[in-house]
Amino acid sequence: MAATKDIPSSILIIGSGVFGLSTAHALAQRDAFKSSKITLLERLDFPAPDAASIDTSRIIRPDYADGAYAALMAEAHPHWRGEFGAEGRYTESGLCLTQDTNADGGDDDAHLYLVRALENVKTRLGLKVGRRENGGQVEPMETPEDVGRVTSCMGGECGKRGYVNWTSGWADAEAGMCHMRKLVEILGRVEFKTAEVAKLNYGKDRVESVELVGGEKLTADLVVLATGAWTPKLVDLRGIASATGQVLAYIDITQEEQDRLGSNPVVLCETNGMFIIPPRNRELKVARHGYGYANLTRIPHPERQGEMITVSLPRTKQDDPKMNISFEGDKACREYLAKSIPDLATRPWTHTRICWYTDTPTGDWLISYHPTYSNLFVTTGGSGHAYKFLPVVGERIVDIMSGNEKDDLGAELTKKWKWPEQRKKVDHVWTDDWRGGVKGMYLDEEMAKGQKEMAKSRL
Ligand SMILES: Cc1cc2nc3c(=O)[nH]c(=O)nc-3n(C[C@H](O)[C@H](O)[C@H](O)COP(=O)(O)OP(=O)(O)OC[C@H]3O[C@@H](n4cnc5c(N)ncnc54)[C@H](O)[C@@H]3O)c2cc1C
Ligand SMILES: *[C@@H]1O[C@H](CO)[C@@H](O)[C@H](O)[C@H]1NC(C)=O
Ligand SMILES: *[C@@H]1O[C@H](CO)[C@@H](O)[C@H](O)[C@H]1NC(C)=O
Ligand SMILES: *[C@@H]1O[C@H](CO)[C@@H](O)[C@H](O)[C@H]1NC(C)=O
């Protein structure tokens, strides 16, 4: 696949999240594609409120244990710190990563990220280690008191140890996406359309047409699927990637609380995956980076007529405007909030949301031509960590699309993101990437439990 590909005369990108929009941005600037017609389809008016890329905030952290993502983040970071992150789109608040267990507990769990990262803190050259007030960029927290000192404005307990990387922060996710959209618009090369794709019509070895809800059929030399957690509906991804629902809860706070908490670092607990993003405009967010919920649904096989398959697909407020988070998820957010910011323990959520990751077994993305259909390129599998790469990932995607690896990192990423030679023999993929919460929860079951608990509490 290393050979340079023929340049398609028309490219149809489906999905305007991080992957689709950044692909459009990179394509629109490449000389090689200057005579390709580029169209970007999105099922809802941009920005789609239930897309994974659209929210109040996303964590921007450079401290990946994996060298390739760390290198890619080193490319993205200057953009966040520069024009891309200007006007409040990026805030370098620091990220306080904690563990809820003591140094003698939890180490047996070999993957513990923090232990490795702390080693990294101690041995790494180039970054200043120490307290922030002394110019430290990475600040180890060896005791609960250290953690308490760094997060004192929260007034609660945020963990037993950990470290703060003061060079991390968070992005206003929707604002970042709107900025990217503007950058694409300015280039004047991409036609935007709001329309939902019902299905791809597959021939033996290519996608013959893209069929919209309503029946209209579009054709293109190259079809780029960037439909996030909805992708398993349009191509068979069983054993490769699945939608998993993650819980988010928001509360309104007072101006006094905003002033007190607003410049706090992001706090993320490695033990349970819970995190709190510092408030903006008097709104604070609590969420969990978890294994999530599967929403198993029977659908027609996207590639073969007359066959049904079971896959997990998103269910969002677009499907049910009254949808809340599950009882279990609500409880997890509530307990974490009460523990970390006791003042806010009983403040009701103003709204909640289930947001959908596209999870792969390893947490590596899927960015590749389809092995069977030569004009189908898939870019998805974000696994809950792709947002931070918004300013640069499109360039890497288009490198893979054109078969041009511009450097060693490109070659490594191509390998990491390629279509897997073997699928896992399961309908639903539960990732083995680092997560909090319980593995193996199903949306319907958890929602039903909620109804029962709520009925009980009304008695
Ligand atoms: C709760 C949550 C927290 C996260 N936190 C972080 C974080 O802190 N840091 C970080 O770096 N990353 C984070 N991520 C991950 C990151 O947001 C995602 O990896 C990234 O946004 C995925 O982008 P995407 O383009 O694959 O999907 P999406 O943004 O979902 O885009 C897919 C688009 O396709 C459209 N679409 C779907 N089906 C169709 C169709 N049939 N026809 C037309 N259009 C269609 C959808 O409407 C949607 O707009 C988080 C994700 C979630 C959900
Ligand atoms: C903190 O962030 C920097 C990049 O700004 C990164 O190089 C470093 O590895 C991070 N620290 C840790 C402990 O991972
Ligand atoms: C999962 O979500 C889809 C899309 O909203 C919905 O049609 C389906 O019924 C859901 N499945 C279950 C088991 O709830
Ligand atoms: C969601 O919660 C709100 C507020 O508590 C409630 O009014 C609504 O009925 C709930 N929705 C569902 C579907 O349970």
Image: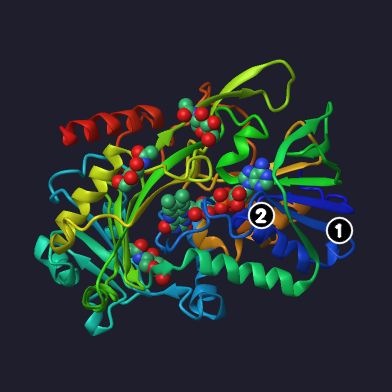
In the image, residue 249 lies at what x, y percent? 33, 53
The residue that mark 2 highlights is: 20
Helix, strand or loop status at disc 2: helix
At label 2, counting other C-alpha atoms closer than 10 Å, the crowd grade (few under 14, some 14-19, many 20 or more) is: many
Residue type, mark 1 in image: Lys
Residue found farthest to the left:
145
Residue 351 seen in this snapshot: yes
Q: Is residue 36 left or right of residue 19?
A: right
Q: From what the image shows, is residue 118 above or below residue 133?
A: above
Q: Earlier in the sequence, mark 1 or mark 2?
A: 2
Residue 291 seen in this snapshot: no
Residue type, mark 2 in image: Gly
In the image, residue 38 lies at what x, y percent? 81, 58
Which quadrant of the view contains residue 126?
bottom left
* Label 2 within 8 A of ligand 1 by Cβ: yes
Q: Do the numbered discs 1 and 2 sit on residues whose CB atoms are within 8 Å?
A: no
Q: Is residue 452 left or right of residue 39?
A: left
User: Which quadrant holds the C terminus?
Assistant: top left
Please tell me which residue is depicted at 51% across the width and 22% down the height of the picture: 426
At label 1, counting other C-alpha atoms closer than 10 Å, the crowd grade (few under 14, some 14-19, many 20 or more) is: some
Disc marking residue 37: 1
Q: Is residue 167 left or right of residue 391?
A: left
Which quadrant of the view contains residue 437?
top left
In the image, residue 211 lies at what x, y percent? 78, 38
